[in-house]
Image (tube, helix red, strand yellow):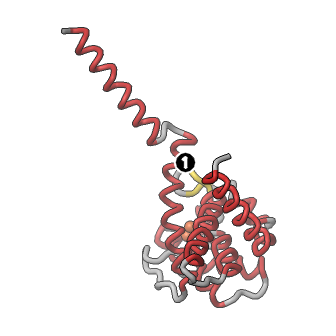
Amino acid sequence: MGKKSRKKEARREEIREELERYGSEILQSEEMQQAFRQRHHTLSTVGAHTMRVAATSLAICYALKKLKIKTDIPAVVKGSLCHDLGILGRNEKFHSSGECSRQHPVDSVEIARQLTGELSDKTQDIIAHHMWPVGKSKPPRSLEAAIVSAADKIAAVTDFVEGYSEQRPGVRDVLHIIRDRKKENTEWKTKKK
Ligand SMILES: [Fe+2]
Ligand SMILES: [Fe+2]
């Protein structure tokens, strides 16, 4: 293993440990199991998306730590793991995508409270404002909430791209097809000459 991949593996391990340490009751909940059964962002699941948001949020926190900027890791773990649990059962619960967009953060706060007991102001801020700047969401009030909101948007893009490469010809496959066609065409043209 090269130095770079060893570093990457160590970072992954650190993220895993932190998620276990502060989020085990959420990770083991019935809601989280259900999250892995509900589709999200076309080809992903709420669960896969949630794990991406949590990992990306922590990676941002570690990068800030190098700049000597402290973040509340327990709040980031709890908030990112719970941010979309209120979206479970969306088709039965919400009548429109507008209602879903407005209401699911409110419902996620409620589920987070049930799963973890006392919710810190920061955890609540993270969950309640994670949709910002989409829709009518109020802006985050803390650095931690801004981090998870940014991670949520980054993860949404990854959901689409990785979902495609897992289940359909992905971006990379399409590029291969175009390259092969181009090759075929040039060969064909040369043959014709
Ligand atoms: Fe959301
Ligand atoms: Fe999300």
Q: Residues within 10 Å of mark 1 (few under 14, many from 20)?
A: some
Residue type for callout 1: Gly
Rendered view: 29 above or below 111? above
Residue occupying image coordinates x 72% and y 66%: 14
Residue 182 left/right relative to 3: left
Q: Residue furthest left?
A: 193
**Residue 120 at what x, y percent from top left?**
69, 89
Q: Nearer the viewer, residue 161 or 183?
A: 183
Which residue position is annotated with label 1? 163
Rendered view: 114 above or below 165? below
- Residue 94 appears in the figure: no
Q: Nearer the viewer, residue 47 or 106?
A: 47
Residue occupying image coordinates x 51% and y 79%: 146
Examine the image and state in which quarter residue 69 appears.
Answer: bottom right
Residue occupying image coordinates x 77% and y 77%: 115
Ligand 2, by image quadrant, is bottom right
Q: Nearer the viewer, residue 169 or 98?
A: 169
**Residue 73 at what x, y percent from top left?**
67, 79
Residue 28 left/right relative to 167: right
Q: Nearer the viewer, residue 106 or 10?
A: 10
- How many discs mark residues in the rendered view? 1
Residue 136 left/right relative to 47: left
Image quarter (top left, top right, bottom left or bottom right) of the C terminus: top left
Examine the image and state in which quarter residue 70 appears.
Answer: bottom right
Rendered view: 158 above or below 107? above
- Residue 68 appears in the figure: yes
Q: Secondary structure at mark 1?
A: helix
Q: Residue furthest front?
A: 3
Rendered view: 149 above or below 35? below
**Residue 180 at what x, y percent from top left?**
38, 25
